[in-house]
Image (tube, rainbow, N blue to C red):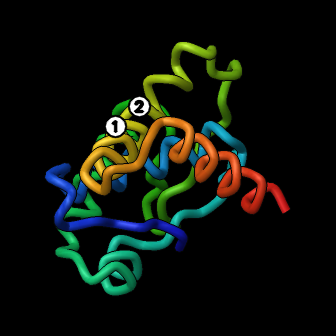
Amino acid sequence: MFLHLNPHSGVPVYRQMISQLRERIASGQLPPQTQLPSVRELSAELQVNPLTVSKAYQFLERDGLVEFRRGQGTFVTARRKPLSLEEQGKLIAPALEQAVSEALHLGLSLPELQRLISQTYANKQR
């Protein structure tokens, strides 16, 4: 899968997983009815404890973003309405906090950070 975990970020790994999966579901990168990797598969791929993946999936299921189907796996549920700008902001806030903290630590100015974000955004849209 395309999750990028940072064990040194100070954010628990399961929270990083939840945040990234929410972002991908909200953006449509994981459309409704998409089957997620099994707990065992994803834990092996990310080299994390299976309980960590299970915990992330449970939070996503509690929030109605995924559903567990016995004998079939975990699937993205159909969203009833698009996320508001405020909801999108809440989803991306942890990643922004992390990026700004790293930029400050490296001594980057705000214009330099904005340029890097714009460049990365443009590269991802290709």
Q: Residue drawn 30% across and 44% down?
A: 104
Q: How many marks?
A: 2
Q: How crowded is the residue under tag 2: few (<14 C-alpha within 10 Å), some, or many (20+)?
A: few
Residue where numbered disc 2 is placed: 93
Residue where numbered disc 1 is placed: 97
Q: Residue drawn 51% across and 23% down?
A: 89
Residue 116 seen from this side: yes
Q: Which mark is residue 20?
A: none
Residue 57 seen from this side: no
Q: Amino acid at mark 1?
A: Glu
Q: Is residue 6 above or below residue 79?
A: below
Q: Is residue 81 left or right of residue 91?
A: right
From the top left corner, tell me how far across and down residue 27 is, in percent. Answer: 68, 41
From the top left corner, tell me how far across and down residue 84 is, in percent. Answer: 63, 14
Q: Is residue 58 left or right of residue 45?
A: left
Q: Amino acid at mark 2?
A: Ala
Marks 1/2 in contact by CB < 8 Å: the verdict is yes
From the top left corner, tell me how far across and down residue 30 is, in percent. Answer: 66, 53
Q: Residue drawn 48% across and 64% down?
A: 73
Q: Residue 100 occupies which quadrant of the picture?
A: top left
Q: Residue 47 occupies which quadrant of the picture?
A: bottom left
